[in-house]
Amino acid sequence: MEILTTALQLEIDAEKHYRSLAAQTQDVGLVNILNRLADVEQRHVEVITAMMNDDLEANAGDDAFLEDVKVLCKKLEESRSEVNVDTAHIKLYEHAKARELEAENRYFTAAKTETDPQTVALLKRLGAQETMHAQIIDSIIEFLSKAEPGGWLENAEWCNSDVY
């Protein structure tokens, strides 16, 4: 199935991208989150490879992933003052989010055209996980975009605003 070949390449690229982002990030919390995302993408590669070999018994998920990320995000938020942000990295995270949304769309579109119920279920589960990844990355973007804990983003339009 062509969608599986495309999906396989998307997952391989996503894993590499997350590992690359982790290598460029100095904050331990962000590195841990990015490496967990890369691990899940590697798991997706294994699932898609199994699907290509007609093994539909493969487990498409990592049920501990979401809980792990919640704990890591909490620790990251607690250490906000220690995080050194290179705002240029935000564009990399935005690119990663776009890739997740593209994969999500491909999985859900493929699920609509697939006839085998087991394959449909796997594709939907992969799509839902990509949705979750995009939400996690969106949270990282929001976290990195804050100038300081509880602070406003720097914006040229606000520099002349009156203090209330």
Image (spheres, rainbow, N blue to C red):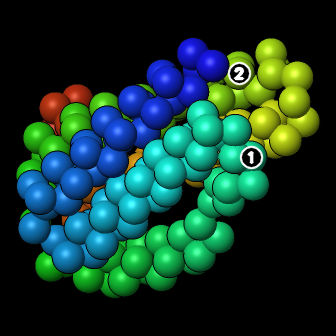
Report whether residue 152 is seen. no
Of residues 76 and 30, the one drawn nearer to the viewer in this rendering: 30
In 3D space, how far apart are the residues under numbered discs 1 and 2 (Cα atoms)? Answer: 15 Å
**Depicted 57 relative to depicted 113: above or below:** below
Secondary structure state at the residue bearing disc 2: helix
Q: Which quarter of the figure has residue 57?
A: bottom right
Question: Where does the N terminus fall, quadrant-wise?
Answer: top right
Residue, disc 2: 110
Which residue is at 40% across, 61% downward?
A: 39
**Depicted 1 relative to depicted 90: above or below:** above
Badge 1: few (under 14), some or many (20 or more) residues near its Cα, within 10 Å? Answer: some
Of residues 158 and 43, the one drawn nearer to the viewer in this rendering: 43
Badge 2: few (under 14), some or many (20 or more) residues near its Cα, within 10 Å? Answer: many
Which residue is at 57% across, 16% downward?
A: 2
Of residues 3 and 100, the one drawn nearer to the viewer in this rendering: 3
Of badges 1 and 2, the one in the foreground is 1
Of residues 99 and 157, the one drawn nearer to the viewer in this rendering: 99
What's the residue type where badge 1 is placed? Leu
Which residue is at 16% across, 71% downward?
A: 27
Q: How many marks?
A: 2
Q: Residue furthest front?
A: 53
Which mark sits nearer the N-terminus, 1 or 2? 1
Q: Position of residue 25 (x, y in %)?
A: 13, 60
Q: Position of residue 95 (x, y in %)?
A: 31, 32
Which residue is at 49% across, 24% downward?
A: 5
Label at residue 18: none
Residue, disc 1: 56
